[in-house]
Amino acid sequence: MYSIKDKIENILMKVAKPARYTGGEINSIIKNTKDFKIRFAFAFPDIYEIGMSHLGMKILYYLINERSDTYCERVFAPWVDMENMMRECDIPLFTLETKTPLKEMDIIGFTLQYELSYTNILNMLNLSGIPIRRIERDFSPLIIAGGPCGYNPAPLSDVVDLFVIGEGEEVINEILDLYADWKDRGFNKEKFLKEATKIQGVYVPSFYKEEYNEDGTVKGIFPLVEGVPSVIKKRIVKNLDKSYFPAKQIVPYINIVHDRIMLEVFRGCTRGCRFCQAGMIYRPVREKSREGLLELADKLIKTTGYEEISLTSLSTCDYSKIEELIHDLIEKYKERGIGIALPSTRIDAFSVNLLKEIQKVRKTGLTLAPEAGTQRLRDVINKGVSEEDLLNSTKEAFKAGWNTVKLYFMIGLPTETMEDVAGIAYLAHKVADVYKEVRGNTKNLKITVSTSTFVPKPFTPFQWFGQEKIDLIIEKQNLLKNMLKGKIFRYSFHEPHISFLEAVISKGDRRVGQAIVKAWEKGCKFDSWRDYFKFDVWMDAFEEEGINPYFYANKERDFYETFPWDIIDCGVKKDYLIREYNKAMEGKLTNDCRLNCTGCGIKELDKGVVCFEAKK
């Protein structure tokens, strides 16, 4: 009789990248499984290399393992070759640390980072022998989910038992305490979930019903059980400097997407870009102290051996002590060759000067995100940067020795015209002209222009817009292909059919959830991977479930319509989002809210919520 470990070892050399499935990495945690009351699997619904780059997983993995009664292990979606071997050899999906089948865990916690990973969640449950629909599961494991996509929980409401709305490290221990208590008393799933609804930030979909109007819009989300909250208020860490952050990070044996120390400098964003969901749901801005960050960097370097520190946030150059922090890190570690990375860089001379300092230790890439090709459209989206900003920044960068630059844009933004799209190419050509002005020619210059398609997201001022139709997006991409020819330019774009599906699910209700299950049953998984994306199969699934996907993706909404996510209170009020929508239509800017409060409502969310106060 072969054990599951024997079976796994027998197939590992037959698949690509077996280190995805071995575990045992430096700083991973091995405990005696018999010593713990709660077995928790942190599940990332994509491959190892992507999941291991996720900062939230690093934080929660160590935080949960600090508990004396809980063992947290990791599990990722196996790549197609591994899944085929597992099904052929009757191997259920297992945790990396102890090779325990997921079915034997008490709780499986999925992080919802991207809507197109939802079929992977279903596939992981099926590969574990766990029924997909919550109504078909009686006892355990309990399936919970959180993360940015959880702010619209409707599409997965028939799958997930309990959603966590807001920041996980703020609420997970309360859920685990309750679970441990119920396990002592004899677990009753229904009663446990009812008790869990008393925890702020917990949404239990089985206690609510979604009803619809005759025109197909949502009439409301109504409680089915007495005593559950009518609105679920998100949880936030009020003092980020005192919140948990691990002094260790797992060091993988294979290259992952972000293979370096990730040091979170602050959460939230004050810029107010009107398309950006993260900028709204992660409010308010909360900074960590420079002293605390330096101390953490020291510990992480000692425990990982990494030679690069990435300063992470939504807009790292906005950190109030960024110059001092970078100076201190460079001075402290330059002799050891430890470099600093700024993954998100604004378009201004200040940011470029910071990059110039950083590249004294290690050369970094120059990536800028103007988002739109014309000033008119940049004002519509409230980007708050000008063409002059971009050209001055690239001029300084070229003077300092850079000869490659990546420019990120979106197409299909509200009010966009073909002139705005052409403006993307004109802007790229102007950057080339700046290079020629600095260097005398364009030899060695490489400009990569990348466009993604605008996806209207919940809790943004642009949530009422429909997505532009696929044919028009392709027409705009073709325009840019023709305008960006030559050795200097490289144009890349995001597949518009994938963006269409993202829009359907982002704005989907519980009915869309039925189509997600159907699509998985018909073979869909790894939908964000172009080689595995099956648009025709998805469209068949929508048709078989009687779902019109264009209703969700392309339809313009009015301000009075009820959304599936209106059950959630993210702190930012709807009247603020409407004000920002109207200002967008007038091309009016809203200032960075560190300068003046813009009245988004976040300060009223909860007692003790304090917005970042800028020094005058």
Image: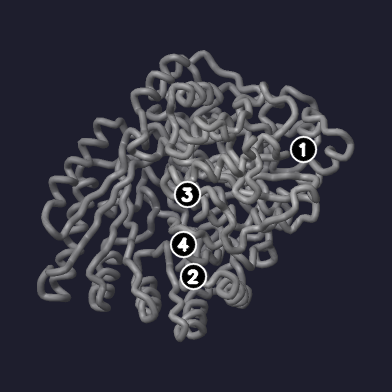
Mark 4 and mark 1 in contact? Answer it, CB < 8 Å: no
**Residue at image mark 3:** 18
Whether residue 67 sits left or right of residue 375 in the image: it is: right
Across and down, in percent, residue 68 comes to 80, 55
**Residue at image mark 4:** 259
Q: Earlier in the sequence, mark 2 or mark 3?
A: 3
Across and down, in percent, residue 398 comes to 23, 73
**How far apart are labels 3 and 4 at the CA level?**
18 Å
**Residue at image mark 1:** 196
How many other residues sit within 10 Å of disc 4, few (<14), some (14-19) or many (≥20)?
Answer: some
Residue type for callout 2 = Ile
**Residue at image mark 2:** 309
Residue type for callout 3 = Pro
Across and down, in percent, residue 224 comes to 73, 22
Q: Earlier in the sequence, mark 3 or mark 1?
A: 3
Whether residue 507 sits left or right of residue 536 in the image: it is: right
Query: Where is residue 28, by image quadrant?
Result: bottom right
Query: Which tag is nearer the camera, tag 3 or tag 4?
Result: 3
Query: Where is residue 210, by image quadrant?
Result: top right
